[in-house]
């Protein structure tokens, strides 16, 4: 093999190696930033990773919201009407957050089985349901009409109590 061909071969192999390293490092960095969605059934079944950031969603269980009067801490239960997941959050909840409505929480699942939320996302209006929550509820055997009717019923009861 001539010297020029050998040099070109080394340059090409070097570029391919650098490209492979760059792709590998990029994929590794993106892996830690992915927030996978899990329903309460999947969390209860052990499918969700512990101590990694995930998204979980469902309906806020009626009567489960407990606020600490001395701080911004709040604890509530997210349900898909099959399983429940306890969520603890410290901060200001969205204005649209209430019992019987769909939410998506971003946080870390603790070894004890509860979720420490960093962010709580509430629905936009009475007909909106986050796609992941809608899919999880449908997998649990509920149609969109079922949970919209149930959410409206809970909202009416809560308004009557106020």
Image (cartoon, helix red, strand yellow):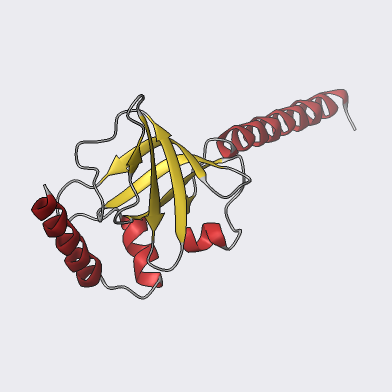
Question: Residue 149, image x and y in percent?
Answer: 17, 67
Q: Residue at x 18, y 46 (%)?
A: 124
Question: Residue 141, image x and y in percent?
Answer: 36, 76
Residue at the outermost bottom position:
141
Residue 39 showing in the rendered view:
no
**The one of 93 and 107 positioned closer to us in this rendering:** 93
Q: Residue at x 35, y 51 (%)?
A: 64
Query: Number of numbered discs present?
Result: 0
Side of 19 where 92 appears, left or right: left
Question: Residue 107, image x and y in percent?
Answer: 48, 39
Residue at the outermost right position:
1
Side of 132 where 32 appears, left or right: right
Q: Is residue 162 above or below residue 147?
A: above
Question: Residue 153, image x and y in percent?
Answer: 16, 64
Q: Is residue 122 above or below residue 61?
A: above
Residue 109 showing in the rendered view:
yes
Q: Residue at x 20, y 60 (%)?
A: 151
Side of 93 where 51 appears, left or right: right
**The one of 114 and 70 positioned closer to us in this rendering:** 70
Q: Is residue 39 above or below residue 76?
A: below
> Which image quadrant: the N terminus?
top right
Q: Residue at x 36, y 25 (%)?
A: 71
Which quarter of the figure has residue 91?
A: top left
């Amino acid at each position: 093999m001539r010297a020029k061909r050998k040099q070109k071969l080394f340059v090409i192999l070097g570029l391919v190696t650098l490209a492979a390293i760059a792709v590998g490092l990029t994929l590794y960095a993106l892996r830690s930033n992915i927030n996978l969605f899990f329903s309460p059934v999947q969390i209860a079944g052990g499918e969700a990773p512990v101590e990694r950031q995930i998204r979980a969603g469902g309906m806020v269980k009626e009567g489960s919201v407990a606020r600490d009067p001395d701080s911004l801490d709040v604890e509530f239960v997210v349900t898909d009407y099959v399983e429940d997941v306890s969520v603890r959050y410290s901060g200001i909840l969205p204005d649209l957050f209430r019992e019987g409505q769909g939410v998506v929480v971003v946080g870390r699942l603790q070894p004890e089985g509860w979720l420490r939320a960093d962010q709580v996302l509430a629905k936009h209006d009475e007909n909106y349901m986050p796609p992941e929550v809608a899919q999880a509820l449908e997998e649990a055997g509920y149609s969109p009409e079922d949970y919209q009717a149930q959410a409206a019923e809970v909202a009416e009861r809560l308004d009557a109590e106020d």
